[in-house]
Image: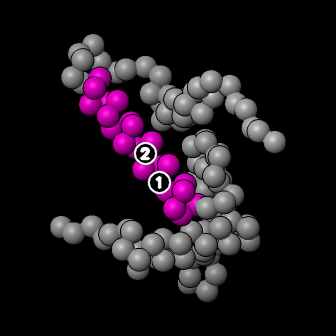
Amino acid sequence: MVCRTKRGDASENRIKDLKVGFNMEHMPCGTFAANAAFFAIGVLAYNLFVGFRALVLGEGFVRSQIQTVRWKLYQTAGKIVRHGRNVFLKINVAALDLFTRLREECSKLQQEGVLVHETS
């Protein structure tokens, strides 16, 4: 069985993810140099996201757009609880499992030398 896709299907989805997901629909300035720098930073952010999605997030996020990843990772609902002079953040067990797996993946990549600590 041969899988046929429409011409440009994959690249159009990447462009849409870059434009909508990273707010690159409109250039901020009237000067070419400023817009070029803005666009270069946006493309760099997109490429870092694609690498993060492939190396760290894994199978469940292979085809996810930035909005989905943002929703599942950054907009996780939680509740701050104070108990016995301690402060805790209570989150869903599934979210906790996901965050634990992400930390383990990052640690593994760092040990393999794929991720490097910042040196200052």
Q: Is residue 45 magenta?
A: yes
Q: Residues within 10 Å of mark 2 (few under 14, many from 20)?
A: few
How many numbered marks appear? 2
Residue range in magenta is: 35-57
Whole-percent x and y of residue 110?
40, 74
Question: Within 10 Å of the Cα at label 1, are there few (<14), some (14-19), or many (20+) other Cα atoms?
Answer: few
As shown in the figure, which amino acid type bears the numbered disc 2?
Answer: Asn
Can you tell which quarter of the image residue 111 is in? Answer: bottom left
Say which residue appears at 43% left-offset and 45% top-offset: 47
Q: Residue at 56%, 68% (x, y): give it.
A: 102
Q: In the rendering, which numbered label is found on residue 51?
A: 1
Residue 10 percent across, percent down from the top left: 60, 33
Name the secondary structure under disc 2.
helix
Q: Tell me whether circle 1 and circle 2 mark residues in contact (CB < 8 Å).
A: yes
Residue 13 in sight: no
Residue 45: quarter of image: top left
- Nearer to the camera, 47 or 1: 1
Indicate the position of residue 117 as horizontal and vertical percent values.
Answer: 31, 71
